[in-house]
Image (cartoon, grey):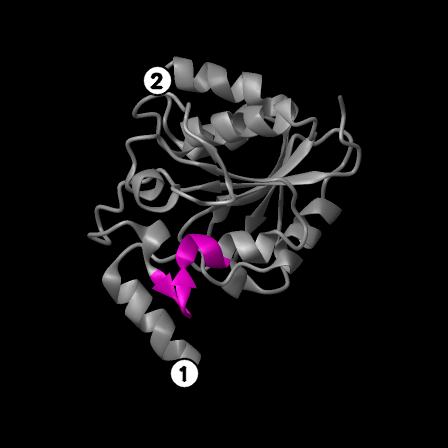
Amino acid sequence: MSNDGAVAGIVLAGGRSRRMGEDKAALEWEGVSMLTRITDAISARCAPVFVAAPAASQAYTTLADGSPLHWVTDEAEDSGPLGGLVAGLRAAADAGVEVAFVCATDMPLVQAGLVDELLAGLTPSTDAVIARDGQRDHPLAGVYRTSAADALSSLVDAGELRMVAAVEAVVTRRIGVSDEDWLTNVDAPEDLHRLHASRVT
């Protein structure tokens, strides 16, 4: 059954956070976990919101108990963010949703406006719209048609882990966004400290 007009949210939270040294999803950001900060922000535009993370991941074992979020834990083992994307898109499709906004769990400045601008770039012939800043693509800040899951799953089955391969495998449009701060991600403690410092000056 199609849920016309609905936009799902998919947050990829299955990473091992090696550079950060602790689970990024559980890091505190302005009084809440980073995962909560992100899901609260995108919930203004997206429903349902899914969190893709393997059952053995730090995010799932730390945050899932009692969480009201829809957790998706069936991504292929060691398939990285691409596997999480496939699992999330399939969960959204099963919920009858045709389009999903996708982001990583390390983007604390994301806002609903990013969802709006990406959706505005989606055309009938486009499978994905991803953000691009002046330097690079951001495939984990994009909207994807849930029907793209099969093509992306074929990449995972072939052992492909790179998100760049995902956007090359489907019809993808790249657009600039009005606020590049939305795309800020934090990979290491120094990134987090720098971002906190910039917010108080």
Hey, what amino acid is under mark 2?
Answer: Gly
Looking at the rendered structure, the secondary structure element under dot 2 is: loop
Where is residue 46 drawn, in percent x and y? 65, 46
Outermost residue toward the bottom? 201
Q: Nearer the viewer, residue 136 or 106?
A: 106
* Number of marks drawn: 2
Q: For mark 1, does the 10 Å Cα neighbourhood hold few (<14), some (14 to 19), or many (20 or more) residues?
A: few
> Who is closer to the viewer here, 135 or 166?
166
Give the SS element for disc 1: helix
Q: Dot 2, how many residues are within 10 Å of its Cα: few (below 14), some (14-19), or many (20+)?
A: few
Give the magenta part as a residue range: 28-37
At 51% from the left and 65% from the top, the residue drawn is: 181
Which quarter of the figure is the N terminus placed in? top right
Pinpoint residue 176: horizontal percent, then vertical percent: 61, 55
- Residue 200's disc number: 1
Q: Examine the rendered structure and indicate whether residue 12 appears above or below residue 21.
A: above
13 relative position to 132: left or right: left
Q: Amino acid at mark 1?
A: Val
Q: Horizontal placement of 200 versus 3: left or right?
A: left
Do the CB atoms of the residues marked 2 and 1 lie less than 8 Å apart?
no
Give me the residue at 72% from left, 40% from top. 122
Residue 110 on the magenta span: no
Give percent across and percent down for residue 34.
41, 57
Relative depth, front residue between 143 and 131 = 143
Which numbered dot is residue 159? 2
Query: Is residue 34 rendered magenta in the image?
Result: yes
